[in-house]
Image (cartoon, rainbow, N blue to C red):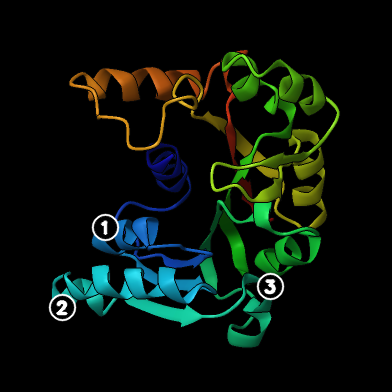
Amino acid sequence: MARQLDEQIAGRFPVGQRLRVLDVGMGQGTQALRLARAGHQVTGVEKDATMLAAARESLAGEPEGIRERVRLVQSDGRDTGVHFLPGSFDVVLCHGVLMYVEEPDALLAGLGRMLAPGGLVSLLVRNADALAMRPGLSGDWATALDSFDTVSYTNRLGLDVRADRLAALTATLAGIGAPLQAWYGVRVFTDTAVDGAEIPADLESLLAVEERAGRTDPYRAVAALLHLCGVRG
């Protein structure tokens, strides 16, 4: 996903431009820190205190120049309008968040308002059109059969969450003034890997295959996750 995001950033902004990035629901700060290391000014928003503490700890281990480029805010992602002015960011990330939001339209509308003209919004969501893939490949036929007609599922943490369909999010992005420009699949072949699985020796080959599949039909359509990129008009 990081490679996909970098591709979109490189295609839309001048080389070397220091971008204003908002990472909503940043978790432990993986993407926020990566983009700060690349020279961008990053604001991370995270509601969960444990995740925020992990992000602060990771940030504390970075050189001063990188620490100065990162601001961390404890808040719900739906409250961006409380903290920031409209059009304040060139890039807005919302990765792995929508599955925990029962009604995401208000959150997405808020993200759209944060974008400057020409700004990029990056969403990472669970693919509702492929919910039967994981249980099907695992031989859980009852769950696979039920998954065809729902957008709800139980994740690996045991939480009941929701997924999004590509067509519905395409319409939503158009509605908030940031029409879909590109979309990718994420975890096409590796979604059934168990948690804590050993990293394979041929990792670069694995990543190359996943990257190729994530941009190629019909593979990307059955990926566990979808990475959608919209651009503010």
* Mark 3 vs mark 1, CA separation in Å: 27 Å
- Separation (CA) of disc 2 from disc 3: 30 Å
Q: Is residue 206 left or right of residue 24?
A: left
Q: Residue at x 70, y 53 (%)?
A: 178
> Which of disc 1 and disc 2 is earlier in sequence?
1
Indicate the position of residue 110 as horizontal and vertical percent values. 71, 69
Determine the secondary structure under disc 3. helix
Q: Is residue 95 left or right of residue 197?
A: right
Asked which quadrant contains residue 180, the reply is top right
Q: Which amino acid, mark 3? A: Arg
Whole-number angstrom distance, CA of label 2 to CA of label 1: 14 Å
Residue 29 in which image quadrant? bottom left
Label 1 residue SS: loop
- The residue that mark 3 highlights is 78
Amino acid tagged 1: Ala
Is residue 173 left or right of 23 when viewed as pictured? right
Does the rendering let one see residue 217?
A: no
Neighbour tally class for label 1: few under 14, some 14-19, many 20 plus, Cα within 10 Å: few
Say which quadrant the C terminus sits in: bottom right
**Quarter the N terminus occupies:** top left
Could you tell whether 168 is left or right of 107 in the image? right
User: Looking at the image, is mark 2 or mark 3 nearer the viewer?
Assistant: 3
Q: Which residue is mark 2?
A: 64
